[in-house]
Amino acid sequence: MVALTAGTASAAGSGLQPLLDTTRVPGAAVAIVRDGTVDFLLGGVRSAAAPAPVTADTIFEAASLSKPVFAYAVLQLIDAGTLSLDTRLSTIVPDFVPDDARATAITVRHVLSHTTGLPNWRSAEFPLRAYFSPGERFSYSGEGFVWLQKVAETAARQPIDQLMTDLVFQPLGMGRSSFVWRPDLEENHAVPHDLQGSPGVKYKPAQMNAAASLQTTARDYARFVQAVLGAERLKPETARLWLAPQSVLRHDCVQCLKGDEAPRDMRLAWGLGWGVAPDDGTFFHWGDNGRFKALIIGTPRDRAAFVVFTNGENGMALVPALAQQLGATDHPLFGWLRYWR
């Protein structure tokens, strides 16, 4: 799936700026991980208002690429005996979803495999509750990760920011990564841009959101990807389960709460924090904070992956073409998220 053969990086690099121009994406940072090494494809600017080039150390919003990083910390807590995959969240933080009998059965496994039955984000249309029995089917949920964040902090008896530093950022050398904004991130950060490429105001999170608030760089996230490919800091069985299918996508939807979605084999599944494509053994995740888009696809078999960060609302428009330039064949993820459009 992710071939990434010799010379691929330079070929893709020469085509990165035309892709940015065509899609009106101001800037992008791509990290390519192969056999323990990392190459970077960099293009465009951090802000159209005050042009400065994107570098491997430019801060981007990871959006939902936050979830695998948080899952990594949770799996380490499981290895340490602090939590288990079958721990019911309600036994540690009982008041997150009040007065809902089905929600009391939600476990750590359900959250990481997106089978909680909770909405992605609570809304007037979908108030916070479990819309089906936990484990019944896939439906993507950021709310589940927020609940699990509170559970991890309570179970570990440690502030969540410090927990992430101790279990992930410090041991992996991810010095420019944080779930909350820090003064040292002011230098060299990207700002969001709309569909026309006009810059907006950078959101600077004051509180951690395990599902979406990670601020990171292509260099730091590549280091995390190396840890994933090398199964670092996890017991062998835990590392295997991380990328093993736990729930299969049977419907052409991301949030699947209504129960009337037409059945369809999407050729995709979910592990414990990662999406997986069983046909070719790849893992993946995408990130969408509106005007920041990100995506990663990797394969443990070939010890290869690529991760893309962009600072434009059109960011996903360049991903399929870039994936092809990087030697990746068509991935069912693109069809599911309709990126080919």
Image (cartoon, helix red, strand yellow):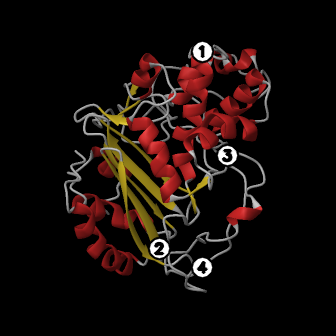
Displayed quadrant of residue 58: bottom right
Which label lies toward us, 3 or 2? 2
- Residue behind mark 1: 84
Badge 2 amino acid: Gly
Badge 4 amino acid: Pro
| Label 4, label 2: how far apart the Cα atoms are | 11 Å
Q: Secondary structure at mark 2?
A: strand
- Residue behind mark 3: 123
Q: Secondary structure at mark 4?
A: loop
- Residue behind mark 2: 27
Residue at x 75% of width, y 29% of height: 153
Mark closest to the chain's N terminus, 3 or 4 = 3
| Label 3, label 4: how far apart the Cα atoms are | 28 Å
Mark closest to the chain's N terminus, 1 or 4 = 1
Mark closest to the chain's N terminus, 1 or 3 = 1
Q: Residues within 10 Å of mark 2 (few under 14, many from 20)?
A: many
Q: Is residue 116 visible?
A: no
Badge 3 amino acid: Ser
Mark closest to the chain's N terminus, 2 or 1 = 2
Q: How many marks?
A: 4
- Residue behind mark 4: 199
- The percent coordinates of residue 60 (x first, y second) are 56, 62
Q: Quadrant of the N terminus?
A: top left
- Vertical side of 261 occupied by 81: above or below: above
Q: Secondary structure at mark 3?
A: loop
